[in-house]
Image (cartoon, rainbow, N blue to C red):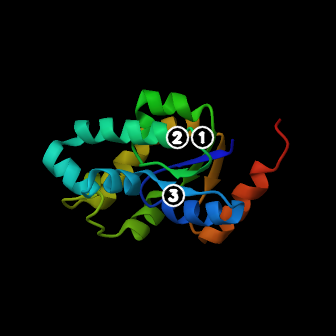
Amino acid sequence: MTTIALIGAPGSGKSTVGALLAERLRLPFFDVDTEIERMHGKLVREIFADDGEEAFRAIEKDATLSLLVGDGVVSLGGGAPMTPAIAEALADVQTVWLKVDAHDAFKRVGLDDSRPLLAGGGIRATLITMLRARTPVYAAVGRLHVDTSGREPVEVVEEIIARLQEPAA
């Protein structure tokens, strides 16, 4: 079984890099947020607004855990590794932390209102706070740490593939 999980902050490139990586490795690609929207018939931001973050996190946990048991490249939501059951499941798959600095994350995210935790203004400050809180968890669960700041998605994919082929130390 080949499962590669991509974790990282909003704007780190999980969806873009994930789709390219899956194509290169001839594996299916799953974006957890997209799968949640498909399964529940509403946008993630609508789930947050209608049901709250706690309900969303429960849905996210179930969707993520189900996707981590099959072949494919799985792009997780930025906060998913903060859920203990997800962090534990990531120990059983190749987990790649796509690192990004706040400046690049902000440039990529911009004023995207589809990201509920970044809605309502103060996106740059929210990203900085999010990065500070989540970085230790990303670092702990990510087997590979790949910096995406200032890099094109294709470069990131090439590095991931090369590093996945390295012999285990």
Residue lying farthest right? 167
> Spatial distance from mark 2 to mark 1, Cα to Cα?
6 Å
Q: Which element carries disc 2, helix, strand or loop?
A: helix
Mark closest to the chain's N terminus, 3 or 1: 3
Q: Which element carries disc 3, helix, strand or loop?
A: helix
Q: What's the residue at 22%, 49% (across, down)?
A: 47
Q: Decide: marks 2, 1 in contact (CB < 8 A)?
A: yes
Residue 14 marker: 3
> Spatial distance from mark 3 to mark 1, Cα to Cα?
13 Å
Q: Is residue 75 above or below residue 155?
A: above
Q: Percent from the top left, x then y, of residue 80? A: 42, 41
Q: Percent from the top left, x then y, of residue 39? A: 33, 51
Residue lying farthest left? 50
> Spatial distance from mark 3 to mark 2, Cα to Cα?
13 Å
Neighbours of disc 1 within 10 Å: few (<14), some (14-19), many (20+) = many
Mark closest to the chain's N terminus, 3 or 2: 3
Q: Which residue is mark 1?
A: 142
Q: Which residue is mark 2?
A: 138
Going by the numbered disc 2, the residue's amino acid type is: Tyr
